[in-house]
Amino acid sequence: MSPYRALLKTKAYLGGKWVEAASGDHFPVVDPARQATVAEVANCGAVDAERAVEAGQAAFQTWSRTTAEHRAMVLQQWHDRLLEHQDSLAALITLEMGKPLAEARGEVAYAASFLRWFAEEARRVYGEIIPASSNDKRLFVLKQPVGVTAAITPWNFPVAMIARKVAPALAAGCSMIVKPAEDTPLSALAMAHLFEGLDAPAGVFNVVPTQDPKEVGKVLTTHSAIRKISFTGSTATGKKLMKQASDSVKRVSLELGGNAPFIVFADADMKAAAEGAMVSKYRNGGQTCVCTNRIFLESGSEQAFLDEFLPLVKQLKVGPGMEEGNQVGPLINEDACKKVETLVGDAVRQGAEVVHGGGRHELGGTYFQPSVLRNANPSMRISQEEIFGPVSVLSTFKSEGEVIQLANDTPYGLAAYFYSRDTARVWRVAEQLEYGMVGVNTGLVSTAQAPFGGVKESGIGREGSHHGIDEYLEIKYVCLGGLEP
Ligand code: ADP
């Protein structure tokens, strides 16, 4: 039996029950490694989304009144279950989105770390007592859950992106409705399966799979009972959702696209820089929002970097994620593959040189060769748009000022990376990069205890860290008057 069978759920999870869509419709989930349909999942619509909101409202009444201690216990137990089923859940992730099993296992551990972190943070939601200006008053600040919340999540981390949102929501006392990406509903439903039976009211966590994100998204962004929407995905969709949510003045958290610069100064440790670039570029086949998009090398150090970097790229094993040892799986779908192909073609026409790879992989399907291009310039589409594929794009710079300007010359501001051994430069550059996250001498920055998020058109709000729970809390000021002076 396949390791993931026990976690395979195909109905929607609404109000604590597994139900078919009101329409009775289904949609296929495709394994990108084989281009084969692996399941048919309930295709929910507006009616189902409304049912989920009602379930969320009912659950909120009791969940918001439970003790933080209790919510912490539920999250901790969910965490434990994720880890107990780490291998099966990882296999399911790989099945529906293609990443190598080792990375999928890492994703489950990363997702679980948010459940644990927010189980701990649930107990640290402190209010305030403010000194009053007269003796007959006392001023208090309470922090209370915002209410019913919704999450719209992407396919590239189909478990972790849900955990990162639902953990702080539940910790704060909110209920949540999740609309997973149409490519990856199975991981979300497996999360619900692992939640089932924990001591929480039915409807605290709901999953509404759909092939029509617009219809369900409309309900989630406009329903008056939903007080907050958290989204991870493209900037274009994020802008639409923000507009839709504005009519009912919902709180929004947006984690959107990036265009991460990776700067290597001549004084850097080139081996470490090459290793950092590998992690930050080729993880998940280049399909993460914090993946390096543009590699800037200080003049004179290009060859030294390539000498360390190229052998590592050439060693990458491409193949089905389910086969242990493969490091780069297929891209999520044909559209994604075409987009990478188009960006590379455009760059080459404008003078970029292919150092390695440069096209589809001989395995066919949506496999793309790990590639390296050099002589890129800022006017190329590949320098301006998120590549979301295993392609490194190199160019050179002459001075610190020039590269900071190049790095910041984008509407995005999610993650940036640079390598240098000069402490004064480290501070100067870190402070001047207009990004929400900066990795210095590392290509990997995400961790549950640090604030993840972007500036400019890369988003609003932070996930993870002690700031993450604030996104799900309202501040209420209570002024108690009439006291004896
Ligand atoms: P990507 O390019 O990574 O697929 P998207 O922003 O299109 O990014 O998708 C991220 C999430 O947003 C997915 O869950 C997708 O279904 C959802 N989505 C896309 N368009 C809409 C929309 N108009 N309304 C609501 N959700 C949407």
Image (tube, rainbow, N blue to C red):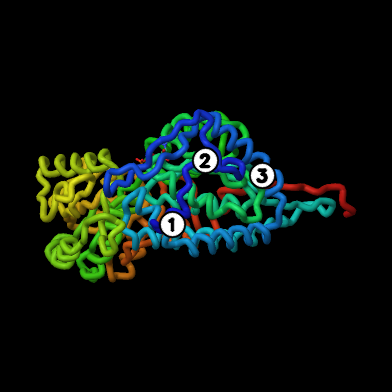
Please tell me how crowded label 1 is: few (under 14), some (14-19), or many (20+) other residues with Cα within 10 Å: many
Mark nearer the N terminus (2 vs 3): 2
Q: Quadrant of residue 467?
A: bottom right
Task: Give me the residue at 23% from left, 62% from top.
Answer: 264
In the image, farthest residue toward the right: 484
Whether residue 210 is visible here, answered yes or no, is: yes
Query: What's the CA distance linking mark 1 and mark 3?
Result: 28 Å
Screen quadrant of the N terminus: bottom left
Mark nearer the N terminus (2 vs 1): 2
Q: Position of residue 407 (x, y in %)?
A: 28, 51
* Amino acid at circle 3: Phe
On the image, numbered disc 3 is attached to which residue? 60
Horizontal side, residue 344 vs residue 7: left or right: left
Which label belongs to residue 156? Answer: none
* Amino acid at circle 1: Leu
Screen quadrant of the C terminus: bottom right
On the image, numbered disc 1 is attached to which residue? 89
Q: Position of residue 86 (x, y in %)?
A: 44, 62
Whether residue 289 is visible here, answered yes or no, is: no
Q: Name the secondary structure under disc 1.
A: helix
Task: Give me the residue at 38% from left, 46% from top.
Answer: 155
Q: How many labels, in total?
A: 3
Q: Position of residue 286 (x, y in %)?
A: 28, 52
Q: Name the secondary structure under disc 3.
A: helix
Q: Position of residue 20 (x, y in %)?
A: 52, 36
* Amino acid at circle 2: Ala
Mark nearer the N terminus (1 vs 3): 3
Query: What's the CA distance linking mark 2 and mark 3?
Result: 20 Å
On the image, numbered disc 2 is attached to which residue? 12
In the image, farthest residue toward the front: 1
Instruction: Say above or below: 481 vs 422.
Output: above
Task: Give me the residue at 37% from left, 58% from top.
Answer: 104
